[in-house]
Image: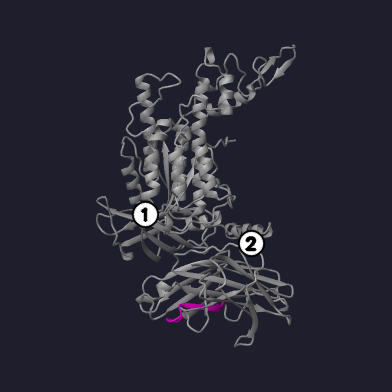
Amino acid sequence: MRARLIPLVVCAACAALAAQEPAPRTSDTPPTFRAGANYVRVDMYAMRDGEVVEDIRPDEIQLLEDGARQTIETFEHVRVLPAGPQESRIEPNTVVESRQMAAEARARVFVIFLDTYHTQIEGSSMMRLPLVRFLDRVLGQDDLVALMTPEMAASDITFGRKTTIISNIMQEQWTWGRRGRLHDNDPNENLYEACFPDAGDTAGIAAEMKARRRETLTLDALQDLTVHLRGVREERKAVITVTEGWRLFTENPALARATRNQAVPGRPWVGIDPDGRVTTGRSPATGVDLAQCDADRLAVALMNNDRRIRDLTEDANRANVSFYPIYARGLAVFDSPIGPDPPPDLATDRANLTARQSGLRELAENTDGLAVVNTNDIDGALRRIVADLSSYYLLGYYSTNTQLDGRFRNITVRVTRPGVQVRARRGYRGLTAEDLVAATEAERATAEAAPAPIEVVVNPRAQFRIRTSAWMPADGGGDDASVWVVGELDYATRKDLAWSAGATADIVVVAASGADVATTSVDIAAAEGTFAVRVPDEAVIAPGEYAVRVRVQATAEPGLPMTDTARLIVGDQPSSLGEPIMWRRGPSTGPRHLVTADPRFQRSERIRLELAASGAGTATAQMLDRLGKPMQVPVQVSERVDASGAFRWIVVDAILAPLAAGDYAIEVTLEEGRQVGTFRLVP
């Protein structure tokens, strides 16, 4: 098991970023996925003669999956905003919100990996100011960054936008490099030194075991990080790895052989203790655990990290992770530190330095990254790394492969324009039926745990949003449910000339098998930009878990459509109340209410919830604060029957002027039914 001895710099950074909240998932849980069984998103970077190409057209792109031509459904060119003041950056308030921001395709995601085991204190000192300038001046306003070391688990990292705290720590706690440290006080390394004194036939054994173990721990951490980032989002993730490289040890039969003072490999140590009794496992002279030493020696002697680095690059390509290794000491002449151990001869030292830097180049080249070695211009290299990811294209397509087989699928992207080279996501793992329901099961388990603060997760940059509402009537006499879908174009988008004549929305409900369960279409009025429709129009849907896919096409400009997906959960327990549909009224809507899929409101607006209901009881409602406690804010409850006469609706209205900015909820109760509608009040 990997020791988790976290240096002071890492402890402080984790505490600052994690905000004292546990991570919602660990890196060994199944990766998250985007709702919509067959929708795939690809990021593409186009260059010509070393310059970014920013005018690629969709008709110039050829996209193939496992050799089969795919039709591009969505296309967007993303230009990253330059760095701005820290005060203007929107910082996530919780771990969940940070993961939601990281999943936004239009934000860049960086992880700074400080390889403490393989960086000398001179290297950590040299990297201090370049990293601070990178954090404070180079990262854009929407970029997200996290910090990790080999002593951490990947699930411990948390992404943030305001980098002041991290940069302050980097300035103050710059002695994080552990390579060559005289007194490191690592229990495992202390054990090796006690088991294998640096003399006689055990000379050099402890030193090699320590070096091999550190290298393995570092590669373990990078592997863990890669798996974790695969579940964070589909788009590219950049890992800036600050290190002095690795020897990439292979098998050493000589280290595996038993020595005069040690046991036969694979068998326990046997000796005589001071009172004449036979003892096993511990040395009678020192009391150290020789059996543990023997087991560790065999493990590190048989490892092959040269093969592991190749496996790491393959996994990184599958996870769309690019490594940008930076040699911490810049332009270096010697590999080994001055002490405490005497350095090897010049030829061996030079070979070690070459091997370390070659490994960094291999890691970068095979993951579409950039290796920064043999240069003292670290600032310029960091700026180049960020610029390398400053302009890209987001492509979306519905895969023609509808099999839920969980297999890896290769993606190939080409541009027909002469002289343009492109880099793009190399592939993805297809979903299984179990994947489609795994996230829902996790959400259900979380809901059944201890009550948590109200938390509204919203993508502030989305151009189109959808929400779903389901209801299985308590007095319906069956086990089928009605479903409503609400869609809304962003206010800025609907003012665009292309959308000024309105739009059409095609709605599809997809089962876990990938089959279409229900389809419908609805017109979106130009003056409103929103819609609410029952899907299907008059039928019902059986309990289960589905994906809702909405494709919106502008009437005036039949170009590439805008799409979004959402997960739909149809419960199997009847209720007197359905899930709420949200409406707003304010300066932007005039004297009427408009249905909305955006849970953000302003104090000048009113909020309305409408819930399908059964039974003859009287509904009640109350406003709740972020902690779920009732507030003394008036909430008005009424009811209506829709034009078809098929549904009775509970209508809840509230004025938001008395509230401060933050997350809130309205709780509605009817007989045994209870529903909660959450929203966010923004300045």
In the figure, is residue 663 to the left or right of 557?
right
Instruction: Classify mark 2: residues with Cα within 10 Å, few (<14), some (14-19) or many (20+).
Output: some
Q: Is residue 406 above or below residue 289?
A: below
Is-magenta flag for residue 526?
yes
Q: Percent position (x, y) of residue 365? A: 36, 42
Whole-percent x, y for residue 239 in the image: 43, 45
Quadrant housing the N terminus: top right
Q: Which residue is mark 2?
A: 627
What range is drawn magenta here?
A: 524-535
Q: Residue at x 35, y 47 (%)?
A: 385
Disc 2 secondary structure class: loop
Residue closest to the eye, 422 or 245:
245
Look at mark 1 in the image and give the residue it sits on: 83
Identified by mark 1, the residue type is Ala
- In depth, the one of 632 and 137 nearer the eye is 632
Residue 436 vs 120, above or below: the answer is: below
Return the x and y of residue 434 as percentages of the image width and height: 60, 57
The quarter of the picture where residue 96 lies is bottom right
